[in-house]
Amino acid sequence: MNTNTPQQTVAIFGAYGHTARFLIEEFHERGFGLSLGGRNPERMTALAEVHPYARTHVATVDDPGSLEALVAGAALVVNAAGPFGDTTGPLIEAALRAGIHYIDITGEQPVTRHSFETYRDRLAGSGLLFLPALGFFGGLPDLLATVAMGDWAAADDISVAFALDSWHPTAGTRKAGARSAGKRVTVSGGRLVPFDDNQDVPADWDFPAPAGTQPVRALGTADQVTISRHLKAPEVRAFMNEAPLADLRDPGTPAPTAVSEDGRSAQSWLIDVVVTRGAERRAASAVGRDIYAVTAPVVAEAAVRILAGRTLPSGTASGMRAPGEVFDAEDFLSSVADITWSRR
């Protein structure tokens, strides 16, 4: 029998998705009560059988009442349902009506940008924290950039470089990529400007071990949006090594395959963030396994800190925020057991 109080309950929408599996297990292991929702009745029935300790709801974005039932009694809701262009607005509104905190795991840059532009002023002073794109893209690079920036008030350039040994995308990742086509931006001259595939980029990136030097291509990523919201740098760029991008472009690349009982794949990843100011250079990097699975401990750690009031002082206590604004980035990264990080 679940004995958690309502203040310890987290609602998860999109609860039968690939990443949601890891979220459910992570929150359950941390002792939270769970309210799980999704739009497919058959899949929700199957989920209820696997997780009898959780409340389950058939919930859809076009039925506000069903979303209200999902979040009733919860202290925080996690939106794990893509395409996030369809789900983010209704879930944010449901969280606002319920007066609870909100996190989503989108990696969709246009959605992340829209969330900040639409809700940041509206949420100011609300006492609620809304964190979009709190995952492998968006959240982790933002925290690493915050650590690398350190005590600098401003920098000339922040570059985020991703190295994946492979990328077996979920169906949601493929849909998100299709929806984001032609809508990506980058940060140049201190502004969000349309992404240019022909922009000047380094041919190679000298990643820390074990990735080493690899050819890279420019990306438009959610972390360029989160970083630009609170760290001052006229240029915020993102790159990825070419091998996983080739996987992503290939329609025959299969979905992730679990290699262990916890559902994680064998994929390895590295994120390297370099901040420059004049001739000075600072960097922070992290390594781990499975870009989808690592989202769960990051989200759960954020939820624990939000609900316990373990956030930075005034000015970051509420609103639409990036994680580096809200948490002690160094302490946060050190608390996530699934990653190993360092600065140089």
Image (cartoon, grey):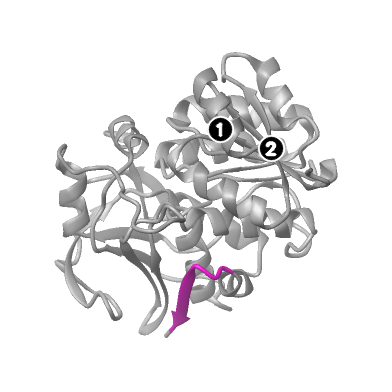
Q: Answer few, some or many: residues within 10 Å of disc 1's Cα (few below 14, many 20 plus, some between 14 and 19).
A: some
Q: Secondary structure at mark 1?
A: helix
The N terminus - image quarter? top right
Report the residue at 41% width, 42% height from top.
109
Q: Quadrant of residue 290?
A: bottom left
Disc 2 and disc 1: Cα gap in Å?
9 Å
Q: Which residue is mark 1?
A: 47
Asked if the stretch drawn in magenta spans residue 338, the answer is yes
User: In this orientation, does residue 40 appear?
Assistant: no
Q: Secondary structure at mark 2?
A: loop
Amino acid of disc 2: Ala
Amino acid of disc 1: Leu
Q: Which residue is mark 2?
A: 54
Question: What span is colored magenta in the figure?
Answer: 336-343
Q: Is residue 124 left or right of residue 285?
A: right
Horizontal and vertical percent position of residue 152 = 54, 76
Horizontal and vertical percent position of residue 27 = 64, 51
Query: In the image, is residue 23 above or below residue 281?
Result: above
Q: Are marks 2 and 1 in contact (CB under 8 Å)?
A: yes
Q: Nearer the viewer, residue 255 or 68?
A: 255
The C terminus - image quarter? bottom left
